[in-house]
Amino acid sequence: MRCGSPIWWDDAAPAGVRFPGGGLSADVAIVGGGLAGLSTAYHLLARRPGLRVVVLEATRLCAGASGRTTVLLIGEQ
């Protein structure tokens, strides 16, 4: 793990991974994979386990402002 980076970046996805295409059906689509989006998905599934929830993110999960501020939460510098 690099100092100052979130622990979920340790196992980076292979380069060039693309969405598989085709159709996708969901009950709830959450746009944005930051702390708010992931927390929303988590709490929806905790309340309704059978719900089909999709989180849509343009780049990496928690890569923007969420990724920077979480380093502060875990106390790394």
Image (cartoon, grey):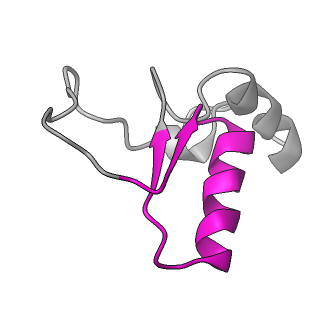
Give the x, y percent position of residue 28. Answer: 52, 51
Q: Residue at x 66, y 21 (%)?
A: 64
Q: Indicate left or right for 6 with 50 as reference.
A: right
Comparing 7 with 66, the one in front is 66
At horizontal 63% and vertical 49% (from top left) the residue drawn is 38
| Number of dots carrying numbers | 0
Residue 15 lies in quadrant: top left
Tell me, yes or no, whether the highlighted magenta stretch contains residue 58: no
Q: Is residue 45 left or right of residue 47?
A: left
In this view of the protein, can residue 71 be seen by the observer?
yes
Instruction: Identify the image quadrant of residue 2.
Output: top right
- Quadrant, the C terminus: top right
Rendered residue at 86%/45% (across/down)? 73
Above or below — where is 31 with respect to 49? above
Q: Nearer the viewer, residue 60 or 55?
A: 55
- Magenta span includes 36: yes
Q: Is residue 65 above or below residue 74?
A: above
Query: Residue visible at 69% across and 53% down?
Result: 40
74 up-or-down from 31: above or below? below
Residue 4 visible (yes or no): no
Left or right relative to 18: residue 26: right
The quarter of the picture where the N terminus appears is top right
Q: Position of residue 5 (x, y in %)?
A: 64, 32
Q: Position of residue 42 (x, y in %)?
A: 63, 63
- Bounds of the magenta segment: 26-55
Q: Position of residue 74 (x, y in %)?
A: 81, 48
Residue 29, placed above or below residue 44: above
